[in-house]
Amino acid sequence: MRILLIGEFSRLHNSLKEGLVALGHEVTIIANGDGFKNFPADLSTKAKWSESKIGTVIRKIIFKLTSFDFISLEFGIRFYFHLKKLKNYDVVQLINEAPIQTIPSLERFLLKKIFNQNNKIFLLCCGVDYLVARHLIEKKERYSIINPYFENSNSLKEYRFILDYLSENHKKTHHLVYQNIEGVFASDLDYVNPIKNNKKYLGLLPNPINIDKIKFVETKIDGKIKIFLGINRGTYCTKGISFFEAALKIISQKYLDKIEIVIAENLPYKEYIELYNNSHIVLDQVYGFDQGYNALEAMAKGKVVFTGAEKEFENYYNLQEKVAINALPDVAYLVNEISFLLENPNEIIAIGHRARLFIEKEHDCIVVARKYLKYFSN
């Protein structure tokens, strides 16, 4: 089977590709690398001119005068020049309703080309799109990534990308996509409720993790316990990073001689991974019910991850013991949970073991790829 995967935000499509290729299928990824993360792709739409020295200056001037980011147009133009190679695939999967990340009119033009020159089209809901944005803005969950938007007017800049999905211009893209797809998958529980009542919803397919590439490292605590916090300024509010920072400030005073805190900011994916490799505890996000991709990769290495691990998650996977720490937007709660681990280091080792076993059972990229293929072939 020839499979085309469009877009990449977290390495999800790369891991899915590895699972599909291991099962004998031909897979191509086309993507722009997602900025500083620089994820690999077979066909790149990475913006070269907009990120050059001259291009960056011109881009900033245009943005200041018009609020238009020229980089999105370059993504579309570079995708257009790949169109001849993007024909006659048995299956095409979009990682988002707007996977090309270009201006809306060009996005629709390019997607129509893809729909017309290929066979089955599927959509993955693994981030914000129209249905997710509408669900969040209507406060359908007890808490979500939208909380800071309602609580702090200064966070508006970070939330523009969510509000853009509610615009009339994007709704046209949303309707175009749903008219042409065979169905839509959710990648974790955070995306099930927003789309489960849509007639195109097919079910939850867990994030794929290549457990052969991500080796489990036996946790050894023979000195200071290392706590890692990765910061992406573009998702500072949606991840709830301020809660982690406040908790670490208290923890650093309380356990001065017992811990080492490592903070990384806006790093490429490879450098980010290398920095947290030696950590025991990884602080990921506070607003999720389930884990995102970064958390899963850290769990696969045997780290104790503070992330989404709500009751809904435990019930769905029928878990009797913790495989991650459910993080909440509550500083006192986070301090208590971190303190417990620092005072009971054997629990760090035990949770790390369970985390790896959970990933092997539920997220192995070959197991997940087989689940995708059942739908692709049906």
Image (cartoon, helix red, strand yellow):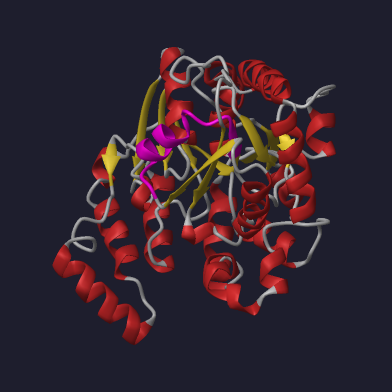
Q: Is residue 37 left or right of residue 365?
A: left
Where residue 1 appears, as percent x and y from the top left, is 42, 21
> Is 287 situated above or below 8?
below
Q: Quadrant of residue 372?
A: top right
Residue that sits furthest to the bottom in the current view: 65
Total numbered circles: 0
Q: Quadrant of residue 142?
A: bottom right
Nearer to us in this view, 109 or 337: 337
Where residue 108 appears, as percent x and y from the top left, is 43, 60
Nearer to us in this view, 31 or 309: 309
Q: Is residue 368 left or right of residue 320?
A: left
Residue that sits furthest to the front in the current view: 257
Residue numbers of the magenta segment: 267-282
Q: Quadrant of residue 29?
A: top left
Where residue 40 appears, as percent x and y from the top left, is 33, 37
Residue 291 seen: yes
Residue at left 58%, top 65%? Answer: 162
Residue at left 68%, top 67%? Answer: 148
Nearer to us in this view, 336 or 187: 336
Q: Is residue 63 magenta?
A: no
Residue 330 seen: no
Where residue 288 appears, as percent x and y from the top left, is 70, 47
Residue at left 29%, top 51%? Answer: 79
Quadrant including the C terminus: top right
> Is 260 situated above or below 157?
above
Q: Is residue 168 left or right of residue 75?
A: right
